[in-house]
Amino acid sequence: MTNAVQNRDSKCNMPFVAFSSYKLPIGNLTMRLLVLFVILLTGLACSKKAGHSTPPEAKHPLILVAADGLEWSVMEPLLNSGRLPAIARLMASGSYGYLRSMDPTYSPVVWTSIATGKGPAKHGIEHFVYQQDGKQHYYTSDHRKTKAFWNILSDYGLTTDVLGWWMTFPAETIDGVMVAQTNTTGVLDDPKRALWKGSLLRGVEGQVTPPERQNEVMDILDVAEASFDSLAASIFGATATTPATPFTKLMWDQSRWSFRADAVYTQVALRLLQSKQPFDVLAVYIGGPDVAGHRFWRYAHPQDFFNPPSADEIAAFGRVIDDYYVHLDRVIDELLRAAPDGTTMLIVSDHGMHTVNPRGEFSVDDAPEQWNSGNHLDAPPGVFIAAGPGFLDATPGDTLPLPFARANLAQVGSVFDVLPTLLALKAIPIGRDFDGAVLTGVIEPSWLEKFPVREIATHDDKAFEAARGQRMKEATDQAERLEQLKSLGYIQ
């Protein structure tokens, strides 16, 4: 990844190389002027939109951890027992609270709403899949009808790395590195697999931009796969990773792919940070808390179920959710240690999690929707934690006051407010077509005095729509290539 970051602007340099090597007749003044004009336009497009800029003071780095399904009721006892020290330090030096979700809480819908500041009626992602010609198809990045934060920040010349975010396949060209979350169509024909989230697949084009970085990311994928068993044992212990019954084996198999994907995305994030190259925003998606909650809630809360697990199963799997939260805390600590001084940290979840299916049998013969013991379809609120330059220190002191009680948490805002708040931290205007607003209560008042919130009609433009239209034409071919990968399964 070092070369990837050292040459972040290589995609902008390539047109200049191509034109400088093109031999034009000396006397063809008109053609020479035309080429110079195209070069000028290319340079402007690669750097930032004409007239768009951010003040130097707003270019401090920001890390956005998108933790799917992070739940305050799980965090509460872990914070009080000292098992989430990195998160506790951030809470002690920043602002935090409940983040109101939306209905429905389908992950691709909510995370696209977080990325765009708009609801599904505007951004176009309405579910995991859509029906066409009697078949199910995955939504892709091409179906998103409006700009996401990575497009807007790139317009303003800000370097943005986006790793594993929902609905990013095929990966878009941005000012930074994008590693997409990728799906295969094979899972749609086998409902018993019940796997919805994407991962990475070797041999599929369009998962990484700049495209010359894809092989390097795939090498990280191979290393993560080869070392996953030892990583899993270090997170969960040997007992949890060697399930003894058909159903616990199913639950582990239904979770392993997500934990491995998280390992890849976080490893790429660490490589980028360790390169010490400047960045403005680094966003990394971590889906394990959601998956662990869906599959192992019953083992952590057996008292909620008419058919609880056995004592041996509770001993083996009752700590899986907690252990993954502790692992997430270690990842956050690693990211902060590798980040430059003065980095802002923003942690958000799309929703919380609670008990579901309390009367379930939990058998491998059940329908897949009956396998989950934790869920979120009634939109429980998620987590919001923000600390660092620009954000308000709402809990003065060096440590988080204990005992921490989630009953005292206030509602900070909604998932639609994340993007406007992020843009305010970068002194970028807020679109009047957003469905959310700037969370002024979590931003330092002196920051807002220095950089008052400004508005524009929209960040969308004809160029974005034209590029999206071209990608939509290419999507059919891409779908056919994914169809050919059915035999590889979901994450092979």
Image (cartoon, rainbow, N blue to C red):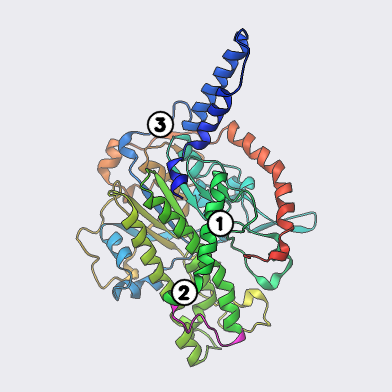
Name the N-terminal-most of marks 1 and 3: 3
Dot 1 and dot 3 residues touching (CB under 8 Å): no
Name the residue located 28 percent from the left edge and 49 percent from the top edge.
341
Magenta region: 236-246
Picture layout, residue 363 above or below residue 107 = below
Q: Residues within 10 Å of mark 1 (few under 14, many from 20)?
A: some
Q: Where's the C terminus, which quadrant?
A: bottom right
Name the residue located 30 percent from the left edge and 67 percent from the top edge.
85
Q: Residues within 10 Å of mark 2 (few under 14, many from 20)?
A: few
Name the N-terminal-most of marks 2 and 3: 3
Give the residue number, with chain letter if any, for mark 3.
Answer: 53
Name the residue located 57 percent from the left edge and 42 percent from the top edge.
146
Whole-percent x and y of residue 188?
A: 71, 64
Mark in front: 1 vs 3: 1
Whole-percent x and y of residue 13?
A: 51, 32
Give the alpha-carbon distance from disc 1 to disc 3, as whole Å. Answer: 34 Å
Whole-percent x and y of residue 35?
A: 58, 18
Report the amino acid beneath label 2: Ser
Give the residue number, with chain letter if any, for mark 2.
Answer: 230
Name the N-terminal-most of marks 2 and 1: 1
Give the alpha-carbon distance from disc 2 to disc 1, as whole Å. Answer: 20 Å
